[in-house]
Amino acid sequence: MLILSVSTRSIALRTLRALCLALGLAQSAAVLAAGGQGPVVSAARVEEAGQGAKLHFEVSGPAQAVAYVMAGPDRVIVDLPEVNFQLPPRTGQPESAAKGKTRKPAPARIVASFRFGLFAPGKSRIVIDLGRPALVQKVATVAKPDGSIELQIDLRETDAAGFATAAKAVASEALARELMADAPAQPATGSADAQRPMVVIDPGHGGIDTGALGKRSVIEKDVVFEFSRELKSILEKSGRYRVTMTRSSDVFVPLANRVKLARDSGADLFISIHADTISDTSGVSGATVYTVADRASDTQAAKLAEKENRADAAAGIEGADDSSDVSDILFDLTRRETRTYSHAFARMLVNHWGEAGRLNKNPHRSAGFRVLRAPDVPSVLLELGYLSNEKDSAALLKSEWRTQAATAMLRAVDGFFQPRLGGPREAGRPN
Ligand SMILES: [Zn+2]
């Protein structure tokens, strides 16, 4: 089995990190912040007639908004200072999505659907999916005669060429801003503390990106966050691990930033937590552990990766293509070694999960998940269960279940790090 000695490995990793920086693989730092600040948005509606559409958001105070268009998929982005969206979770979703069918923008309407949420600290966002090309005519905060305040967004239909020109202008500006942004350094950790393995937990989705909507009004971003917090607490209580989360509140974090945070914090293990839905509900249930692979293990895994990889687009940012081929022997060796470790942890997780929860019929699969692409951090994506399944949804909502499942995960993590921490070896770890 391919394995580098500890010292060779750490030199290899350092060189690899420098290489990645030089290649510009580093992205701006992950976004972590508290939510729920600012004026409250308490109602939303869309008016559409002829070639125009108008969105109304009732706000408790003025909110200066900026709106612009983006192509592929065609959408309008509205950026505003942090506001507190107190709207039912399905607000803005098309009817078909509410029934659990595939989301298809109604072609006859300008506004096919819209989403909203916290995008970054101090910054909220509304994303309007367009059914027909349209440009922003006006964005204004209007005081109404009855004393209420409304944020109004006026859209007017345009042709495909007009939309493309406007979107291109926005994209070049955004790219310039992105290049100017620099990543703040991670705080240094004490040397005694640094002996303990670092586990990075990645609660999927967040903020404007809700993830899957399941039965019992369960929202993926919320259940995976609750579970991640429980897992963090259980791992920390063991005293054996340092633990960081990629988000500590209901905030959007781009996929590349999740990977970057894992690498910058010197993660020894990265666990991304999700909970999927499936439209053909023929009793599909249980947890599945995914590892990264260039070729998906099956069509369902491929579809899921495609869906999860769309998270950035859902929040209105362009997903950077991080699949670029780096042809370097050192890079290749490290990545191969990392994948061996990822597989080992996935097997352990599957073994231990059965102690507390139900497993999918085919519990270890692989596909091209962007969030698992750190070349030097063993990474897995755990789908806790299917929100489209009644039993899975019910389990996820119970705190006892979360504690049991997170405890089973602690055992898997213990098994994975046993060779490093001392004590008897567990089968499955590469050596
Ligand atoms: Zn997800």
Image (spheres, rainbow, N blue to C red):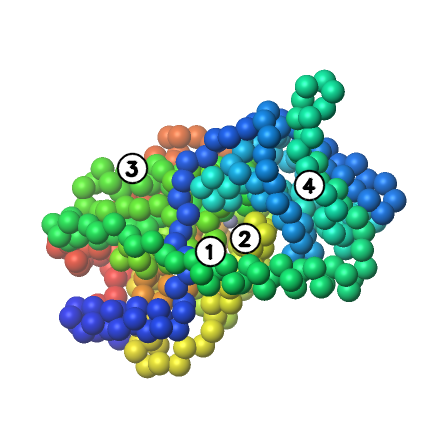
Q: How many marks?
A: 4
Q: Amino acid at mark 3?
A: Ser
User: What's the distance in space between the residues labelled 1 and 3, CA to CA?
Assistant: 24 Å
Residue named by callout 4? 139
Left or right of 175? Residue 363 is: left
Q: Nearer the viewer, residue 150 or 126?
A: 150
| Residue placed furthest toward the top | 146
Provide residue 5's location: percent of width, then percent of height. Answer: 17, 72
What secondary structure is found at the residue carrying circle 2?
helix
Q: Disc 2 or disc 3, which is closer to the eye?
A: 2
- The crowding category of the residue bearing disc 1, from other C-alpha atoms within 10 Å (few below 14, some 14 to 19, many at least 20), is many
What secondary structure is found at the residue carrying circle 4?
strand
Q: Amino acid at mark 4?
A: Val
Q: Earlier in the sequence, mark 1 or mark 3?
A: 3
Q: Disc 1 or disc 3, which is closer to the eye?
A: 1
Marks 1 & 2, CB-CB < 8 Å contact = yes
Looking at the rendering, which quadrant does residue 40 occupy? top right
User: What's the distance in space between the residues labelled 1 and 2, CA to CA?
Assistant: 7 Å
- Is residue 1 in view? no
Is disc 2's CB within 8 Å of ligand 1? yes
Is disc 1's CB within 8 Å of ligand 1? no
| Residue placed furthest toward the right | 50
Q: Earlier in the sequence, mark 2 or mark 3?
A: 3
Residue named by callout 3? 233
Residue named by callout 2? 311
Q: Amino acid at mark 2?
A: Ala
User: What's the distance in space between the residues labelled 3 and 4, CA to CA?
Assistant: 44 Å
Q: Which mark is residue 255?
A: 1
